[in-house]
Each structure stands twice: as structure tokens, then as C-alpha cells.
Amino acid sequence: MPDDQIRTGRCNCGAVRFRTRGPLREVVACHCSQCRRQTGLYYAATNVADDHVEVEGAEAISWYQASETARRGFCATCGSALFWKQRDATHVSILAGAFDQPSGLRIARHIFCADKGDFYDIVDGLPQV
């Protein structure tokens, strides 16, 4: 992806909007129980350096401390899951589904597959951890 690529996205109601610039990590699909419970299926996210993302409506973001090391950001108005941030990290994960289309993003691998829901199978042939 070009270093100058600009992508935009938002929550469902539009109270939170974001803009990224530069390369994004490939999408990772997390099937852990926390991600499954938050989204209803799995958490598919990319990430970007903190200084390469701008957020409008940050006051509408509510942060939930999901563990000792990470927190999850969602729109307090509509409930859209948007961000995942590890303590002391210099990047933020952004849910792939929050990006405006076409996003150009692709899932590269699945993680925490042993914890996935029993109501679906992972059949895309991508690596599973």
C-alpha cells in the first residue's frame, strides 16, 4: 500500500469519524471470547500508528478497560465497536468494518481459533492460530 494512502471511516451513526494515512497492517481476525462477545462473531481489525490517525468526535468514544493491558473504544451513541488499544502501544487497532468502502483491506490470518464460537467454521484457507 502506498505510504500516502488516505482511508476514512466512521461509526454507524457518524458521531465518530476517523481518517488514516499511510500503510495499514493486514487484517487479523480474532476469535477470542472477548472479541466474539463484543461483536457477535469475531473482531477483524487492522492497525495504524497513533500519529497516522485523526479522530473527529473523540468525545463520543467510550473506552472499556477489557483487561490489564488493553482497552476497547466504541461509540457511546450507537454502540459501534471501533478501536482496540494496548497499553503503551504506539499504534491503535481499528475494526476493518468501520472503514468506508472500498477499503482495500484483506484478512491475512485468524487468531485464538480454539476459542471461536461453535456456530461457524473458518473455511477461507488462511492461517489459523
Image: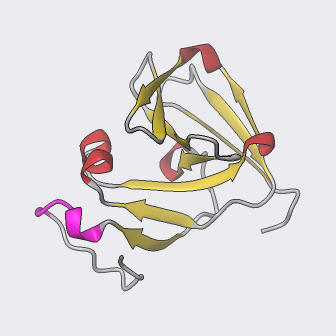
- Please tell me how many numbered marks the rendered image carries: 0
Q: Nearer the viewer, residue 72 or 78?
A: 72
Residue at the spot 27% in from the left edge and 74% down from the top edge: 122
Part of the protein shown in magenta: 113-119
Image quadrant holding the C terminus, namely bottom left
Most extreme residue toward the right is: 4
Q: Is residue 118 magenta?
A: yes
Most extreme residue toward the bottom is: 125
Q: Is residue 78 magenta?
A: no
Q: Position of residue 16 (x, y in %)?
A: 59, 24
Most extreme residue toward the left is: 118
Image quadrant holding the N terminus, namely bottom right
Colour theme: secondary structure
Q: Position of residue 66 (x, y in %)?
A: 37, 36
Residue at the spot 64% in from the left edge and 29% down from the top edge: 17
| For residue 84, side relative to residue 92 (left or right) | left
Residue at the spot 31% in from the left edge and 43% down from the top edge: 39
| For residue 103, side relative to residue 3 (left or right) | left
| For residue 31, side relative to residue 11 (left or right) | left
Above or below, comparing residue 91 to residue 54 in the picture: below
Q: Nearer the viewer, residue 88 or 54?
A: 88
Instruction: Classify residue 32 by image quadrant.
Output: bottom left
Q: Nearer the viewer, residue 115 or 69?
A: 69
Above or below, comparing residue 62 to residue 125 in the picture: above
Above or below, comparing residue 105 to residue 109 in the picture: above
Q: Position of residue 48 (x, y in %)?
A: 69, 51
Instruction: Classify residue 38 by image quadrant.
Output: top left
| For residue 71, side relative to residue 3 (left or right) | left
